[in-house]
Image (cartoon, rainbow, N blue to C red):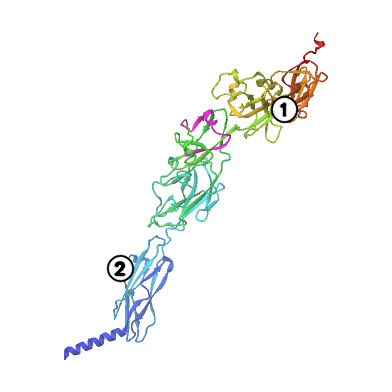
Amino acid sequence: MATLKAFLLAALLKICLAQQGHAVFQASTLNLTEKVGTVGIPLKRVDGSTGILEATVTVDTVASTMQPVDYTFHSGSVRWTDGDTSPKALVISIHDDNTFEPTEVLELVISDTNPGSSALQRLKIYLQADDDGGQLEFTYVTAKGENTSLASSSISLMEGQPKTLQCIAWAERLGGSSGVSTMWLSVCEQEALATQGIDFDFYGANVPVKWEDGETDRRCVLYSLPSGGTRALLPYSWQSAIMIWPDADEEPLEELCFAVNSFSNSSASLSTGTLRYVLADNGATGKATRCFLGADCNVDFTGLHWEPGVNISLAMYCNVQACSTWRWPYAKSYRFTVPAEDIAKRDPGNWYACRCFEESAQAIHVISIMGPWSRNVASCTLGWESCSVQLTGEGLRMHSQTIRVLHACANIGDNSSDDDYIDAGLWKGGIARLDLTQKPGSWYNMADPLEVNSAGPGLFYMCWCFSGFGGRASCDKYSDFVVSAGLFVMEGPHVQEDRVIIHGSPLQFNVTGAGLEANDRISIVTSCNQRDVYMEIPTSDGYFFDFGTVHEGHLPPGNFEFCWCRRAGSLANCSHPDHWTYVGSLNVMCPSGYYNFEEE
């Protein structure tokens, strides 16, 4: 009976306690900062309201990492009367100091007259890492001494190297100095539009940048190296540097991006996670080396993204294919000479000097080849008193240029004089120098076109020579004229076979030559040097001439000459003996049984 009574009392007590409820925190965690000051810790009564409920809150010193000097909390009790479920609160004060501390935890525990099993009977208060360590601010200082924040701006840098070591990123600790602060730089992954190893090289620091407790000084953390510079120029091992390589490509945008890193226990926060720079593209202008056709070319690659011995190709576009077409085996130092034979393999104009990588190519320089195109075509006419030819090419408006009309241009490196290619008349009259008064274009005036008549009509070569700066020739001998400026056509008829005609017979024939045209004229005279004209007719097609039937009244018996002329206004109005070119001879005879008394 007693056992049953004890059981009933225990059950009744359990029911009462269950109706009494128990105390819990409103949340299991609470985040605070050091500057919060005093804050209330709310508690509430749950799962019942019968009778009186008392709860005591204490600090679990084993589970807590927050030091007692950082807070004030006296273990306190709260009390609910019968039927009372209103929230209660205890007070905790957080002490703000100037010492950096990482995130800390203070764990509070509830014990009451009716313990429960809820997780809300424990509260973890997280005191977030404070700002006593300050913040690392990153700036760029302009040439005028103005500071620009790298946290909010992308800095424009000129493509290429500065003249001296240039700091492009300063770091300074502001707003606090407690604790040790560290940082270092690295290249952003898959963000920079510029290509590391081609557009720039990055030399990371050997050790992180470190501000000890109390240090706030400003430090250069990233330098731009001058031409030929290495890490040895940097004052400290914790500094990073970049080498910006100039190129000849014209890109719309090249961006450099460097990640700002720090250790988790670093006391200072970071004002930005990246430092960004935009490379201002110089393009091809101002970077060219001028080379002249027919002459060796001295090249200086100092300061360019290239090392002696690395393959160089010259191409219109730098790519892997270009690197397989033309190489410079003699490029064994930063200053070297390109032979005239190699320069002659490319047309005039701007060419990229391409540095060849394994799977890519970079335009590191521009080679401007000066001279005429070899596809020019010009002409003059036999008998004309003057002749000007226009050439196209690169850089042809410069002084000290000469062209000669020759049977063939000389070969590069061949200093022998070959008389087979030199005609006395051509050499004397077929020389032309640049006439800067004629615009637009590049015009050359022949010295004495009439002297060229001795070479006759046909196809010749215009051979070019430059004796100015960069030129290596005197332009006074045949071996200097090694550059073909194109083809030259001397227009006019060839000398024809001698003809014999008898009075009463038709006189008609075809002529051969170069560039013959309708309305060209042939006259029959005693001598082309004299203008005693007996007969003269034009041609309708340039080749066929029909004098009709020859009578004694038109042309007496005797020996005559055929002379050819092309009218061209003041150039050749066919009124002067020099305008006429000898074509052949004509013997006029009387018919059989007739006699020429003038021959007695």
Residue at the disc numbered 1: 544
Residue 331 within the magenta-colored segment of the rendering: yes
- Towards the viewer: 546 or 116: 546
Q: Does 224 sit left or right of 515 as displayed?
A: left
- Whole-number angstrom distance, CA of label 2 to CA of label 1: 124 Å
Which circle, 2 or 1, is nearer the viewer? 1
- In the depicted structure, whether residue 519 falls above or below residue 179: above
- In the depicted structure, whether residue 466 falls above or below residue 321: above
- Towards the viewer: 187 or 213: 187
- Quadrant of the rendered structure where residue 457 is? top right
- Towards the viewer: 19 or 498: 498
Q: Amino acid at mark 2?
A: Thr
- Towards the viewer: 520 or 252: 520
Q: Which residues are magenta?
A: 329-355
- Quadrant of the rendered structure where residue 48 is? bottom left
Determine whether the residue tagged by mark 1 lies in a helix, strand or loop.
strand
Quadrant of image for the C terminus: top right
In the picture, the disc for residue 24 is none
Quadrant of image for the N terminus: bottom left
Q: Considering only order in the chain, which callout, 1 or 2, is on the residue closer to the N terminus? A: 2
Residue 172 percent location from the top left of the image: 47, 53
Residue at the disc numbered 2: 61
Q: Does 535 sit left or right of 14 as displayed?
A: right
Q: Residue at x 82, y 10 (%)?
A: 597
Determine whether the residue tagged by mark 2 lies in a helix, strand or loop.
loop
